[in-house]
Image (spheres, coloured by chain):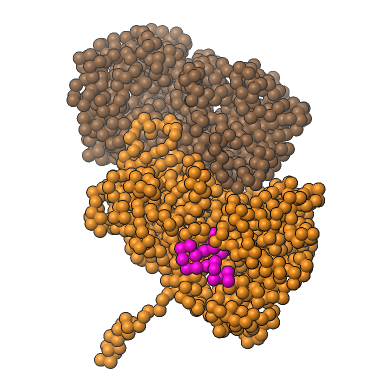
Chain colours: A brown, B orange
């Protein structure tokens, strides 16, 4: 009897008590979708292969000029201020500054069949629909919106490789689901290389699309299942030339003909719906084949229970978020934190079928044996903080990512590690060979579950690829001469750091010869330092410095996406020398102060992608990566309190829980990783070393639940918005009289306590 | 001492005796290369996946009109009258009337690098070279020619999947080998869909080319090895638009850059050569991947011994030719016979990697388990005699070909058997669903080592594919109405025959329901017979015959590639009824006589591909397929002597051992199979029955060495050019008082004797 009562009471208590809010419920995918964050609001699971998200426009890059550079805004397909949605596509980058993808756009419609998107001004001119944010919900692995023009509720969720759509229709004799295989992000009239579609039966479609874009040779295969049989269907082909083949002579291929192929194809599927009838779609992707996509679908979502798919994805997010449990000063801080974790755990993405098959850089099918294969390596961005973060909270995945990069290397005809790689392609974006930083960071931190000798060889090869970005000259002159190869200073500085990373790997592997060689190379940054002006400065092949030079300008001064003020601080592997080189601690402190407090007029960056007013504090550019370590440099000048103040200010101003809350492109999680580290109170200024430099924590409490079974509890005593300074730090009850914590200390767990105050100390 | 002498004598005797000429030495690949044979002179092994052959021009089909329909002449890439060679490509159809392929054209040159072919009038304007037939040798699996403009001797040979080139250069500092990935047969500016090339190292190139042409989605992968390291190399890209990707910003991709991709690419490789230095190339193909191509190369030709490759191919030919050993009246007859066997044993071609992997119709990679997968099914042609020939002399291959067709069926989204299929594509060329004839012929003849129930279902599906070529109307009206679907009479007649074939399969499988249904369908030919004029005639959907009608004209009269005179005789499964329908034996005999003796003016066929003056005797068209059985019909009218006379006349006039020796397109071996059968004295008028109708043998003696271990010796007593009549036939010493021999009789072996005479009897 008592037991019975107990059972009855539990649910009642459950209702009575306000249930604890799960961490994934703090994820707000809308953050960063307005202005320059370039995130997408749609559904995905952690590191998911499918990113099913609404697109609000698809300005082609032919039209880019006409639309005043608008294509750049659509890197993730969605802009919060737009009033219409063109449809829901299955692949999106998160936070990139150049783009691609947007594969397989689906839009449900009612009324007259229209196969073109129409215009935002007049959505009735096409298949797109108006929508409003009041009818929009974006949660972890769940997106919902009402398509006003079609009176359809659209809901999206995903598994690892499958997008799950649920559309609630009105009563309609003319309901359609359109599959636009021409739509895409950063589109171009010649982007579609080939499209192939088969209507296997009245509920299953298969096919693939090959594009040339940022990725030069990219093919994505799909299988699309409907919960309800198609009534009629059709294909429209928009090719300029229809090459002779028997199809054209034999068949009406436009209606109920079960296959289509060509450059430019759109499909539509007709249904008759009752009021509130739901039609679901499972849309599986594969990098390998349509059979692979079918298998992915059958194994990942064998049912038609949309809520089950959604719930499974939420649980995956919860599991990943459990790796860091935080308590924050405000609820907004918690939204910021977990949304940052969400954005950090979106990329790289898993790139293989459920059986481990994937397409390699050599376009052959490979099998990932003993590891998970990943793609989307935005390494110029993510080597800085994202992968160091993974070495703490996602070590297994990080080792697999490096294994994926080593596979890339093995498949590379250049025998080079990835630079910016996605979908079995190298797009060579930005500069450096920063894959070596990831490898060094993993090796130095003991997270090297891969062939380290092979990895070292891969690093050596990558750093000697003579025809790549001035390396030939870098080896010859000790710097990249600006007259031989542009952005020469940025390249020289980043190569120098990368070379230091290679030296660290060699050191760990007891390879003294390589260590010595690369330590020497790592000093090359000195070759572009002009002591007379206190800036790094482009040098010519005759040894002289470039005459015309403006250290404020981001255009044509020997730097890429940055000016001399910011880039001259880029010697992360030799900060002490940098300080000395710049006149010592006090002078360097003043220099840093100036950076944060001076004004950078628009004209100095208005033609530079990835730098916008949103991301600038003084002349410090947080919206782009080269200066992400800069606020921490005060730790080397005897002014950690200045680091603390600046960092807290950046945390507060560059990350806000709003659509326009990100100060710049999230860059595949790098901006978010900066937030996570800095919120916890430390940051990897020098990936490849085992040090993390202290800043000013923003959390009240955090618990890192580590894969090794240990946990580190981080507490910020007297934490508040005003108490931005750290007066004392204790690790496991020992006071730390230094400005850094080591990786080993973190991984050994225990308790780290910051004592916060509003008084700046040293 | 005596023994020693003996050893010494043997070689001396060997030299003294003229060595017996091997059968393969009678192969003359030049036959059919002039005018309309559409054969190619290059190197291949039996059913070889690679057909390495010179191309003399590549008129694109945009230029076709300007060049007066010349593209049609280049179906096999080579025209004997041409004075220049553009290069050597690796894939060719033999004898087709439409075309495709010509993949991976290679040309060695010296002097200034030129990447365009130049013109035939001025070969110095490009890479092409003059040549003369006096410096040309074409043998089984060996082709040799001197490229006069470059002073290079080119030699070609092959294994199953690898082309082996040997080029003998003069002394040259500027020797080049060009790989033109834009060249092709039946070319078009938009034909190349994608090209991908990697220079793996200084002796190995890999890549692939995807084209849209006759095959809509066709990809061929390759691996190319050089016997000597490349000195320098480069790529030229001819795309109209270069879509943004980082390559263009980072690299000079034109020289010594190891990868290239785009629509239109050409590669060149530079060498320095000593006088008479030989550079060899091994060029492996794969339908699956570049790794597959590399494996094919490594396993098939692990060496650089050109002569060894050549010899191995010759032995393969010798082994295949051994299946029929003939003695003929003249040496020319033997050349004709073994060249016909050569052309019959070129197609279909093996289509899988050495490990059995191949790309299927669904674009997925499949494995051929327990069979060899073939492609290039020109079924409207080859069901008539080529596959019946295979059922006698290549039964294992024929069963595998049917297994390949069943795989095609399983992979087909239409669930249909192939019509005209090549390289994982259906090109739907010509009419009918004649795959059912191959299946019936194999089932009836007991050569059905495949799933016969699956095969029957495949036949039933194929014959009910409503949207295919008027089948919907055929099922509704009992004929294809001309106002609903063109070439209606040809379709009705061929469907009726095909349906009879399906009935034969059902009969063999004891499926009475299907048998009865399809026997009924097989009578549909009667629905297009207009007794009032004695011709088959197009009928409209209202039941009336089309008013305007000219039984001589091949244009727009309800027939395809034929006129009513020829096509009205197409009831191969019910010849007795046909004779009756046409007024009985004597009237029908006169009708046949008229066919062979009347005149068909040019205007009646001048716009019809595949019909040319070369292939016409009276109004009988031997140069195209629909009438191939017609001369044998005299056996049903009580005038076998007329059959004998006509057949011998056709053998003598339509097949001559000269470049222009073929009376029409060889059509993947069908013309040649007709020659082989008819030379042996019998022909499969009705594939799907086990009867072969007697004609007039042309051989003196033939031995069929059968796979079952038995052999049939065929002797034509008193054989001579004049003795074209058969007075008596004995099978195993029993006189055959009938006009046919059965398949079982042939396969049981023994001796078949024809008694030849110059007197026409009955």
Q: Is residue B231 left or right of residue A112?
A: left
Using the image as rendered, state which of residue B710 and residue B61 is in the foreground.
B61
Using the image as rendered, state which of residue A522 and residue B32 is in the foreground.
B32
- Residue B738 in the image: above or below residue A140: below
The residue positioned 66% from the left and 85% from the top of the image is: B735
| Span highlighted in magenta in the image | B649-671
**Residue B171 percent coordinates (x, y):** 23, 54
**Residue A198 percent coordinates (x, y):** 62, 43
**Residue A380 percent coordinates (x, y):** 38, 28
Quarter of the view holding residue B634: bottom right
Name the image quarter holding the N terminus of chain B: bottom left
Using the image as rendered, state which of residue A504 and residue B530 is in the foreground.
B530
Does residue B649 appear anywhere in the picture? yes
The residue positioned 66% from the left and 21% from the top of the image is: A124
Name the image quarter holding the C terminus of chain B: bottom right
Q: Is residue B691 left or right of residue B338?
A: right
The residue positioned 63% from the left and 30% from the top of the image is: A115
Using the image as rendered, state which of residue B576 and residue A171 is in the foreground.
B576
Does residue A199 appear anywhere in the picture? no
- Residue B655 inside the magenta-drawn segment: yes
**Residue A138 percent coordinates (x, y):** 60, 23
The residue positioned 69% from the left and 62% from the top of the image is: B570
- Residue B70 inside the magenta-drawn segment: no
């Amino acid at each position: 009897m008592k037991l019975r009562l107990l059972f009855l009471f539990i649910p009642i208590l459950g209702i009575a008590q306000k249930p604890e809010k799960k961490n994934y419920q703090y994820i707000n995918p809308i953050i960063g979708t307005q202005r320059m964050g370039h995130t997408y609001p749609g559904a995905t699971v952690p590191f998911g292969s499918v990113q099913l998200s609404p697109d609000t426009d698809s300005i082609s890059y032919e039209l880019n000029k006409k639309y005043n550079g608008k294509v750049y805004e659509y890197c993730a397909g969605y802009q919060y201020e737009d009033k219409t949605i063109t449809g829901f596509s299955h692949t999106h980058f998160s936070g990139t500054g150049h783009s691609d993808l947007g594969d397989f756009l689906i839009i449900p419609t009612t009324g007259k069949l229209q196969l073109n998107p129409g215009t935002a001004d007049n959505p009735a001119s096409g298949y797109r629909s108006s929508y409003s944010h009041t009818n929009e919900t974006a949660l972890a692995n769940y997106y919902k919106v009402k398509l006003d023009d079609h009176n359809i509720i659209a809901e999206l969720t995903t598994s690892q490789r499958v997008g799950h759509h649920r559309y609630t229709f009105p009563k309609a004799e003319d309901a359609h689901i359109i599959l636009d295989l021409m739509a895409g992000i950063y589109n171009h009239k010649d982007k579609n290389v080939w499209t192939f579609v088969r209507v296997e039966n009245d509920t299953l479609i298969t096919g693939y699309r090959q594009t040339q874009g940022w990725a030069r040779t990219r093919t994505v295969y799909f299988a699309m299942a409907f919960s309800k049989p198609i009534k009629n269907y059709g294909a429209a082909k928009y090719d300029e030339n229809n090459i002779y083949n028997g199809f054209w002579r034999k068949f009406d291929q436009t209606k109920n003909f079960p296959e289509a192929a060509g450059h430019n194809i759109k499909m539509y599927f007709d249904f008759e719906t009752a009021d509130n009838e739901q039609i679901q779609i499972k849309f599986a992707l594969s990098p390998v084949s349509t059979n692979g996509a079918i298998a992915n679908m059958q194994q990942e979502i064998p049912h038609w229970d949309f809520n089950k798919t959604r719930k499974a994805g939420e649980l995956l997010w919860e599991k990943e978020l459990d790796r860091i449990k935080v308590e924050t000063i405000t609820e907004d801080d918690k939204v910021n934190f977990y949304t940052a974790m969400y954005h950090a755990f979106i990329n790289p993405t898993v790139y293989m079928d459920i059986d481990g098959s994937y397409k390699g850089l050599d376009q052959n099918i490979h099998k990932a044996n003993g590891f998970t294969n990943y793609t989307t390596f935005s390494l110029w961005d993510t080597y800085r903080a994202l992968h160091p973060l993974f070495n703490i909270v996602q070590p297994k995945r990080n080792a697999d990512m490096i294994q994926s990069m080593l596979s890339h290397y093995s498949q590379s005809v250049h025998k080079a590690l990835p630079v910016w790689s996605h979908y079995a392609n190298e797009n060579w974006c930005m500069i450096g060979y920063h894959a070596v930083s990831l490898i060094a960071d993993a090796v130095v931190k003991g997270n090297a579950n891969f062939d380290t000798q092979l990895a070292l060889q891969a690093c050596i090869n990558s750093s000697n690829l003579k025809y790549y970005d001035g390396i030939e000259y870098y080896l010859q002159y000790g710097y990249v001469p600006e007259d031989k190869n542009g952005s020469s200073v940025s390249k020289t500085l980043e190569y120098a750091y990368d070379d230091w990373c290679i030296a660290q790997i060699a050191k760990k592997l007891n390879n003294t010869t390589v260590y010595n060689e690369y330590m020497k190379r790592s000093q090359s940054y000195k070759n572009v330092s002009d002591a007379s002006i206190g800036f790094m400065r482009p040098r010519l092949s005759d040894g002289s410095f470039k005459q015309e030079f403006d250290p404020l300008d981001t255009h044509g001064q020997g730097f890429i996406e940055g000016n001399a003020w910011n880039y001259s601080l880029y010697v992360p592997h030799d900060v002490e020398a940098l300080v000395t080189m710049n006149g010592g601690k006090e002078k360097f402190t003043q220099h840093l102060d100036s950076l944060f407090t001076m004004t950078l007029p628009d004209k100095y960056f208005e033609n530079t992608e990835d730098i916008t007013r949103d991301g600038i504090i003084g002349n410090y550019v947080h919206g782009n990566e080269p200066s992400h370590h800069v606020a921490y440099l005060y730790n080397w000048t005897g002014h950690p309190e200045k680091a603390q103040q600046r960092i807290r200010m950046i945390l507060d101003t560059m990350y806000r829980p709003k659509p326009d809350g990100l100060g710049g492109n999230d860059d595949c999680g790098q901006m978010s990783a900066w937030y996570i580290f800095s919120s916890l109170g430390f940051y990897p200024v020098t990936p490849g070393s085992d040090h993390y430099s202290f800043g000013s924590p923003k959390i009240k409490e955090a618990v890192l639940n580590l894969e090794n079974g240990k946990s580190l509890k981080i507490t910020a005593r007297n934490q508040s918005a005003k108490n931005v300074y750290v007066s004392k730090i204790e690790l496991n009850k020992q006071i730390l009289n230094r400005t850094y914590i080591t990786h080993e200390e973190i991984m050994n767990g225990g308790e780290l306590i910051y004592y916060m105050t509003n008084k700046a100390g040293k």
